[in-house]
Image (spheres, rainbow, N blue to C red):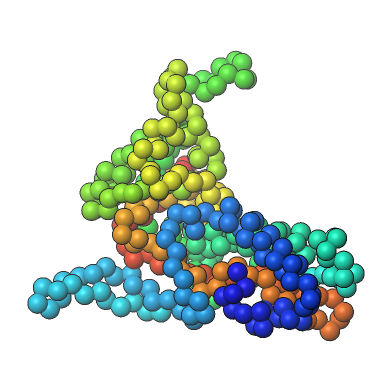
């Protein structure tokens, strides 16, 4: 990972200069931790523009121009979000890193918070509450996130369902959420009907995602997830970032408690761009302690809001 910048700019020449394995282990801990947590990075194609200050936000799609040739209207530049968090080690912890692994433990914790912040910003935008200790430069460039970029939305009501059986351990007979009906209807009415074909991806807050393991019908040997999988070849994901986050909303007199995002991945109309993947930087401190900063620079571009459908669970 540090090859994106070079060790000089990361300050690594100032600490453990003769122990390269320490930095190798730190980089591995960061990569191994942050990768599985990230959700947006699994769903959307990611471009790299190492060191770039901004990315062109081509919100407009190609349109007919002179002589029948299509042109791409150029959008305004959007600054990269710089997401970072810091931790501090004592001199004793630095001296004994090969045995204490204090830096590795701290990096894993920082990676967890950084990955959560990344998804929260990408999906929800600039107003979302972030994990403790995370700071964002160019916060306004998060705009309203991908949920806000979605042109259409569908409401998924809470199903009343049959009365709960007396035995607490008995399985539910029907899905708690009307997820399947709403999602499949939206595929046809909101995506296919506007020329946004598959492959499709579905991102759900943990509660409705977990509910897709319910039986599709009473006594049926298949689940809602089994029925959804053939259509969503780009994956069905659970994202904490959609769990009650984002702007408050009331639909039909009911509060939105969870959210989801239905995505047409055809043509990569929604992409992420990395100017700096997550990396650990060392900052010398005159107090005798040692400051480490975990930082990344990322941005999203949603070229067509019709390729995204927001699901509002009430």
In the picture, which quadrant includes the N terminus? Answer: bottom right
Where residue 36 sits: x, y (%)?
Answer: 58, 52
Q: Residue at x 37, y 57 (%)?
A: 150
**As rendered, which of 137 and 312 lies closer to the eye?**
137
Residue 180 can be seen, yes or no: yes
Q: Residue at x 27, y 53 (%)?
A: 196
- Image quadrant of residue 67? bottom left
From this view, report whether residue 33 is shown above or below residue 214: below
Residue farthest to the right? Answer: 92
Where residue 174 sits: x, y (%)?
Answer: 46, 25
- Left or right of 168: which side holds 158? left
Q: Number of marks in the image?
A: 0
- Image quadrant of residue 218? top left
From this view, report whether residue 11 is shown above or below residue 313: below
From this view, report whether residue 158 is shown above or below residue 37: above
Residue farthest to the top? Answer: 166
Residue 140 can be seen, yes or no: no
- Image quadrant of residue 183? top left
Residue farthest to the left? Answer: 67
Where residue 17 sits: x, y (%)?
Answer: 77, 78
Where residue 226 sits: x, y (%)?
Answer: 42, 32
**As rendered, which of 123 and 18 lies closer to the eye?**
18
**As rendered, which of 32 and 43 lies closer to the eye?**
32
Q: Residue at x 43, y 58 (%)?
A: 44
Q: Residue at x 73, y 81 (%)?
A: 13
């Amino acid at each position: 990972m540090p090859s994106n910048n070079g060790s000089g700019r990361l300050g690594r020449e100032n600490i453990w200069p003769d122990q390269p394995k320490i930095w190798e282990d730190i980089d591995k801990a960061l990569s191994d931790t942050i990768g599985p947590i990230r959700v947006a990075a699994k769903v959307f194609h990611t471009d790299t523009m190492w060191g770039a200050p901004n990315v062109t936000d081509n919100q407009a799609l190609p349109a007919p121009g002179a002589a029948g040739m299509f042109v791409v209207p150029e959008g305004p530049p959007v600054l990269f979000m710089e997401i970072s968090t810091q931790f501090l080690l004592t001199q004793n912890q630095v001296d004994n890193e090969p045995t204490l692994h204090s830096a590795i433990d701290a990096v894993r914790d920082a990676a967890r918070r950084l990955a959560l912040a990344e998804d929260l910003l990408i999906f929800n935008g600039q107003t979302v509450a972030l994990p403790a200790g995370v700071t964002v430069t160019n916060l306004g460039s998060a705009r309203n996130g991908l949920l806000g970029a979605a042109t259409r939305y569908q409401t998924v009501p809470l199903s009343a369902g049959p009365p709960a059986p007396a035995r607490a351990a008995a399985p539910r007979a029907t899905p708690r959420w009307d997820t399947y009906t709403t999602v499949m209807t939206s595929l046809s009415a909101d995506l296919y009907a506007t020329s946004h074909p598959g492959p499709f991806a579905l991102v759900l807050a943990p509660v409705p995602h977990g509910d897709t393991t319910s039986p599709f019908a009473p006594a049926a040997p298949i689940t809602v997830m089994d029925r959804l999988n053939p259509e969503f070849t780009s994956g069905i994901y659970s994202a904490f970032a959609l769990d009650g986050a984002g702007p408050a909303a009331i639909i039909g007199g009911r509060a939105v408690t969870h959210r989801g995002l239905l995505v047409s991945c055809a043509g990569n109309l929604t992409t992420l761009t990395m100017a700096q993947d997550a990396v650990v930087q060392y900052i010398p401190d005159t107090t005798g302690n040692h400051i480490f900063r975990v930082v990344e620079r990322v941005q999203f571009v949603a070229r067509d809001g019709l390729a995204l459908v927001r699901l509002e669970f009430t």
